[in-house]
Image (cartoon, rainbow, N blue to C red):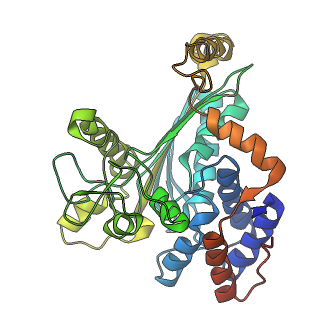
Amino acid sequence: MKVSSEVLREQLGLIFRVWGMPAEFIEMTSRVMIDTDLHGIDSHGIGMLSVYNNWRKMGRIIFDAPITVVTDLPSLCLIDGGGGLGHPVGIQGMKIAITKAQETGLGMVSVRQSNHFGAAGYYARMALEHDLIGIAMTGTPGSAVVPTFGKKNMLGTNPIAFAAPTRRNPPFVLDMATSTIAIGKLAVAKRLGLPVKEGWALDEDGNPTTDPVVAREARKLTPLGGTRELGSHKGYGLAAMVDILSSTLSGAGILCVTRDKGEEFNIGRVGHFFLALNPATIRGDDGFPDELDDLIDVLHATPPVKKDQPVLVAGDPEWEAFKIRTKIGVPVSEQLAREIKNVADEAGVAYLLKN
């Protein structure tokens, strides 16, 4: 079925209110989750609701947690999310980075004591409204990625998002996991009953698997590249870099390190990294968007191998999905609809998604 943004927003609001989330946080969290689905990133939007519900029941999210600024300097800031869900502190963190970039040319915000914040691309794209470059990275609440040559999951999927403003073309928006796929894609494959692609995931013994159930239970993803021969050491290195900037820098902690020390790592210890950069401050003019348009035009003009598959740039598929889904609604599978209904029933609120 296709569901409108308005219905999804109302459904999430009913559930989040029962969970004890303040009205301001409800608006921000719902906005990020729905926007993510509208851009075609089904693994990080409303499909995360049942996961958040499980974490809630485990006591791993404080839905009304205060957000505190710990360190505030002209271009730098450290924020403590208090163990709350990551969307509100993610929005606040990027807003602060944007303000600092407008004032000094560069704004960097580090966040600790947070949780899963959805799709990193949302926060990077926030900078575009102000003609700024935006970067967002995050650690994750669980280990899923197996280092090259290893067989144990040690790192998170640790996504990186980069957004740069244009004038004529849709903006350049790169939003990628540092694993071959995001862990949420295993849940999507399982939900749809589809096999996962070869090279995406490993079983408990570290062998490749295409079974979505086996892959989901093992939670062992390959680093970006898949194998050493195809460059998985690069994805592995990027994943470690994201943890350094998101978690080590903020003091949030990294699961594999705390686990190795025998310490407890709860989900409210996720770290984020946000950066906003003003190209006009560096260049002394406003020509950056025009030159980026020229680059995008040249890349789009690359002769394709197949005429029916033109060359794309980062962000193109998501913008196309956004144009379609804002008109027809967000596709919700039968399995996802059941998951949302179960969460709504458990919360004692009305189930609003109808065919």
Q: Is residue 10 left or right of residue 310?
A: right
Quadrant that contains the C terminus: bottom right
The relative height of residue 316 versus residue 15 in the rendered view (above or below) is above
Q: Is residue 112 left or right of residue 198?
A: right
User: Do we see residue 74 in this rendering?
Assistant: no
What residue sits 83% from the left and 48% below the top? Answer: 327
Q: Which sits in the foreground, 176 or 190? A: 190
Q: Quadrant of residue 264?
A: bottom left
Q: Position of residue 338 (x, y in %)?
A: 64, 77
Q: Is residue 72 left or right of residue 39?
A: left
Q: Which sits in the foreground, 134 or 93? A: 134
Q: How many marks?
A: 0
The relative height of residue 126 versus residue 144 in the rendered view (above or below) is above
Q: Quadrant of residue 63?
A: bottom right
Q: Is residue 8 left or right of residue 295?
A: right
Quadrant that contains the N terminus: bottom right
The relative height of residue 53 versus residue 136 in the rendered view (above or below) is below
Q: Position of residue 213 (x, y in %)?
A: 39, 69
Q: Which sits in the foreground, 300 or 167? A: 300
Q: Position of residue 185 (x, y in %)?
A: 48, 56
What residue sits 22% from the left and 57% below the top? Answer: 207
Q: Which sits in the foreground, 125 or 113? A: 125
Q: Position of residue 43 (x, y in %)?
A: 55, 57
User: Do we see residue 239 in this rendering?
Assistant: yes
What residue sits 42% from the left and 55% below the top? Answer: 196
